[in-house]
Amino acid sequence: MAVEVKIGVRNVAREITLESSQTAEEVAAAVDQAIESGSTLRLTDEKGRVVVVPTGVLGYIEIGAPEGRKVGFGAI
């Protein structure tokens, strides 16, 4: 199940959105650790791409609820 993560960056109108295979708790722990250490936030999306954001420019992090994959034309 994928978790949608939205990252707001200061002074940038567009947010970064990715689907992570990590749980919401794992993403929140990674955010907390990055902020506490003052380093960078590193998250990997479902396709293996890595997103790296310096913690000094983080505006907000929104972690969505896990969602299953939707398959077919009638998937709701």
Image (spheres, helix red, strand yellow):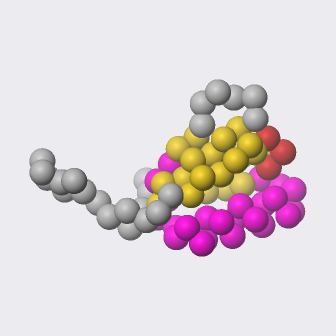
Residue 23 in the image: x percent, y percent?
A: 52, 70
Whether residue 35 appears in magenta in the rendering, the answer is yes
Across and down, in percent, residue 60 comes to 70, 47
> Magenta region, mostly helix, strand or loop?
helix
Residue 39, position in %: x, y? 83, 55
Front-most of residues 76 and 6 = 76
What residue is drawn where x is 74% and y is 43%? 59
User: Which residue is the extreme one toward the front?
Assistant: 76
Residue 58 at what x, y percent from top left? 75, 45
Q: Hey, which residue is sitting farthest left in the picture?
A: 73
Q: Is residue 72 left or right of residue 43?
A: left
**Would you say residue 8 sits in the magenta stretch?**
no
Q: Which residues are magenta?
A: 18-40
Number of numbered discs on residues: 0
- 34 vs 71, left or right, is right
The N terminus appears in which quarter of the rendering?
A: bottom left
